[in-house]
Every structure is written in structure tokens, then in C-alpha cells.
Amino acid sequence: MIGARLLVSLCVAALLAATQASAEAKAIAFADLVDPQATVFEDPFKDMGHELLNELKLVLELDEKLSQNSLTEDERTRLKERRKAAKDLLEINGKDVDALLAQRWDVARKRQNALIATNPVWDGAEVELSGYLIPAPQGADGNFYGYLVPQVGMCSHHTSPPPNQLVRVRLPDDPKSQSLYAPARVSGRLRVEASDATIFVLDGESRMISSWTLYAITVDRGEDVAGKGVVGAS
């Protein structure tokens, strides 16, 4: 009887240990937040280079001008010659102008989707994410918030990260005394929850469009994180 009870106790202990281990936060990087499938598509414009992209843009602009009925014959002839020169340069470099123009909207849609699509693996997961914290005003729901970004200066001096790599953080306490862009390691439950807010950052307003919300349980700030390095941030 005692042996059976001991066996049950050991099984329960093992089950509790396994449950606790499964609930431990998984350290991830900002790149992990992006849906990997959304980034895999054919992009014929990616490696064209600045000069050829400008020539393709010029073809579009000239087509728009040539559609106008108010052009004189001399103007129309000049525009057609310039268009031909741009198209010839593109074709000499192996580019099919008509095919590129036909694909541009589809590629633009896929590029936009790659900026907002989230990795379903981490929706609802307990994670640990390190970056730089931007304090935000208290929300209408009474909770305190901030934004975690992968680089110092993002959303102020540098371009904001795409929505699927800008993480809104619901903080456990008031961040008003927190320095801007302080290193932070945040642990908690991550959810695919979109948000769109405009906050004051450094010397101006910045629009914060995020695809994620991280419900923080612990936030290690400043020296605690800086001394160990910020994992997953550049």
C-alpha cells in the first residue's frame, strides 16, 4: 500500500515538474515573430538595383504623361523616345518590362503582408524577449504599457520596425521613471493582438502600429540586462 502511494506521489511530482517546465518562457528573437511563410515569394524587383528601378519608374511616369491628350506632337515624340531608351536599357539588362509592370501590384501586396504577418507558433506562448523599451502613456483600461523594439532610436531617429516586429508590452507597473530605450528583458504571454497608437517619443510624435501584445510578468531593466547583453536585438 505504501509502495503504491509512493508511486502515485512520484507520478504526481513528475507531472507537476513537466507542467512547470512546459510553462517556462522560451527565449526568442525579434526575427522569430515574423511568419516565415509570408517572406517566401518571388520578388523580381529585389535585386534590380537603384538605376534600373529608376528607369522602370520612369517608364510608368512616361506612360501616364503619354495618356494625356493635351500633348503637342513634339512633346509626344520626345516622351516616346525617352520611354524607348529606358525600356531598351532594361531589356539589355535582361528585364522584361511588360512582365515587371504586370507583377508590381502583386509583389507590393506580398511585401506588405510580410511586414504584418505574425508567426502562429508564438501566439499564446510564454516567451522571453529582449530589446529596448519605449515607455507609453497609461492605457484607457488603466494598465501601463510600453513598446519593445530591436534597436536603439527606432520610432524616433530611425524608422519604426514593421508591425510584426514591434511589440506592445502590457507592463506590471508604471514605467514613467523608466529611461527611454533602456535595455529590457521581458517575460510573459505573447498574443497576436493588433494595436495602433500615437505616442510622444523623444522630440516628436510617433505612430506605433503593432501586431503583437506581450503580457509581461517580469521585466528586467537597465544594468541587469545590459551587463548580460540584449539577446535577439541588434
Image (cartoon, helix red, strand yellow):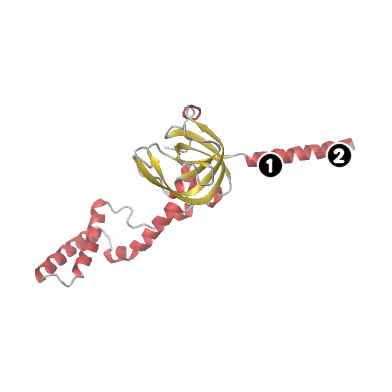
Q: Residues within 10 Å of mark 2 (few under 14, many from 20)?
A: few
Q: Is residue 189 among the parts visible in the rendering?
A: yes
- Residue 19 has which mark? 1
Answer left or right for 178 relative to 217. left
Locate residue 20, reporting x and y percent. Answer: 67, 39
* Mark found first going from the N terminus, 1 or 2: 2
Q: Residue at x 54, y 36 (%)?
A: 173
Q: Is residue 57 above or below residue 133?
A: below
Per the image, label 1 sits on a secondary structure element best described as: helix
Whole-angstrom CA distance, mark 1 to mark 2, is 22 Å
Amino acid marked by disc 1: Thr
Amino acid marked by disc 2: Ala
Q: Nearer the viewer, residue 124 or 21?
A: 124
Q: Quadrant of the C terminus?
A: top left
Answer left or right for 87 relative to 103. left
Q: Quadrant of the N terminus?
A: top right
- Residue 138 has which mark? none
Residue designated by label 2: 4
From the image, state whether disc 1 or disc 2 is nearer to you.
1
Locate residue 204, reporting x and y percent. Answer: 34, 41
